[in-house]
Image: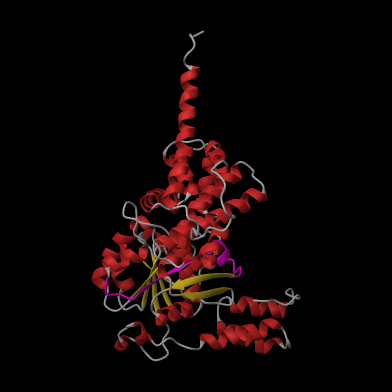
Amino acid sequence: MKLPKAINNPKVKKIVDAASSSIDEAVHAIKDSGIENAPIISNIAEFAGLKKKKMDPSKLGIDESNTQDGAPLRLVFLGGGSFGTAMSNMAARNGCDATLWVRDKATVKAMKKTRINKKYLPNHKLDENLKFSHDLKSAVEGKDIIFVAVPSSAFREMLHQIKPYITHQAVISLTKGMEKYTFAMMSDIITDVLPQVNFGVVSGPNLALEIMDNMPSATVIASDSEALRMAVQEALHSAFFRVFASDDVKGVELGGALKNIYAIAMGMAAAYDVGDNTKAMLLTRALAEMSRFGAAVGANPLTFLGLSGVGDLYATCNSVLSRNYRIGNMLGKGISLDNAIKKLGQTAEGVNTILQVNERAKELGIYMPITHALHAVLYEDKAPLGIALNLMEAGFRSDVEFVMPHDESNARLSEEFDEVLKASKDAKSAKVDNDNDGEPT
């Protein structure tokens, strides 16, 4: 939203503050302000008009007998991490009947009392209309949409737990990542465990702290169902948070998972105090890898040029708020992977994603040198600086190769890079052998 220059005008500020919590209050503030021709007025007025359009629950496959005309969407958010909390708070501010489910009873009790998520968002008061629950059955039953915001390692088990209570609800994944050992995306798990439900995924450059601070942000809802896409847009769209739509579920989901790989690489590079040239090179080559991989597994490569691709990649790779960036930064400073994970204290999805994607890329013959290099650092105990030098010596390439338009096969390129890594390992072994040839002194 384009704000007027005189943002310190108390009347304008009142409108902005009101818009972040209540559309009705914003409209009332507009009428009382007496400000004419302010850009913010027309923007908020237009937004307020859009919010009055209620989604017809029947279009989501929802039992109409459980709904009332004009009633707000009934939503539950499973998982009390930073993003699940931020999204549930957004929905509550937008007038939805929103519940945040958290497993721990004591945590729920504390949140009801203080309206603060002390562990993940300790400096932010949550909306007074947001409900909290630790009872999974009551939290899920009777809802229109279930948003799942648990780590990828717990996603399948979460769906199995709610399965007995599913009657009509749509399911939306807020989780970015891949299931360990299976390469399943969250949408794959939904289809496997709950084949009857209408589903979608939300992904984009969404750092929870910035969203809670009302910094203008945006995300993408991807689903085969237009009605479900519209419902999620209605639930989450606000004056400071735009929700775009897509029907490329796989592409949007892959963007959210793959970018975590390169956030680790960028954090690692930052530990060596690299320049902007290096960062730009890393970002663009990362985007090429993401697009090549996506195209190989059935996604639209153009999706990676949108918010859920390059947008999420940029935000995650340039923010110290990113868990994956912080993991990479610690690795670059010589901290072991195990200790870095312990120090972080939260899930960094990229650690598992590197393992999964590296294996799948080799199976499919996809040229992903950055991913292969990170796998060598995290799981083969290779030195980050040495691997970075190997990347710079990986041979002459063309610039734009997002879907590999050349005669050379992806498989051949992958083999060539493996040879570079092997040569580096052999050289290191030879040096150790030479150092041990002399008589001890």
Q: Nearer the viewer, residue 404 or 282?
A: 404
Q: Is residue 184 visible?
A: yes
Q: Which residues are magenta?
A: 195-216
Identify the colour scheme used: secondary structure
Query: Is residue 40 placed above or below 31 in the rendered structure?
Result: above
* Residue that appears at 56% across and 50% down: 397
* Residue that appears at 47% across and 58% down: 292
Q: Nearer the viewer, residue 165 or 313?
A: 313
Query: Is residue 53 placed above or below 157 in the rendered structure?
Result: below
- Indicate left or right for 244 with 35 as reference: left
* Residue that appears at 59% across and 79% down: 19
Residue 213 part of the magenta segment: yes
Q: In the rendered view of the protein, which quadrant contains the N terminus?
A: bottom right
Residue 391 at x, y percent in the picture: 54, 43
Q: Residue furthest front?
A: 407
Q: Nearer the viewer, residue 148 or 409?
A: 409
Q: Quadrant of residue 6?
A: bottom right
Residue 228 at x, y percent in the picture: 40, 79
Q: Is residue 348 visible?
A: no
Residue 47 part of the magenta segment: no
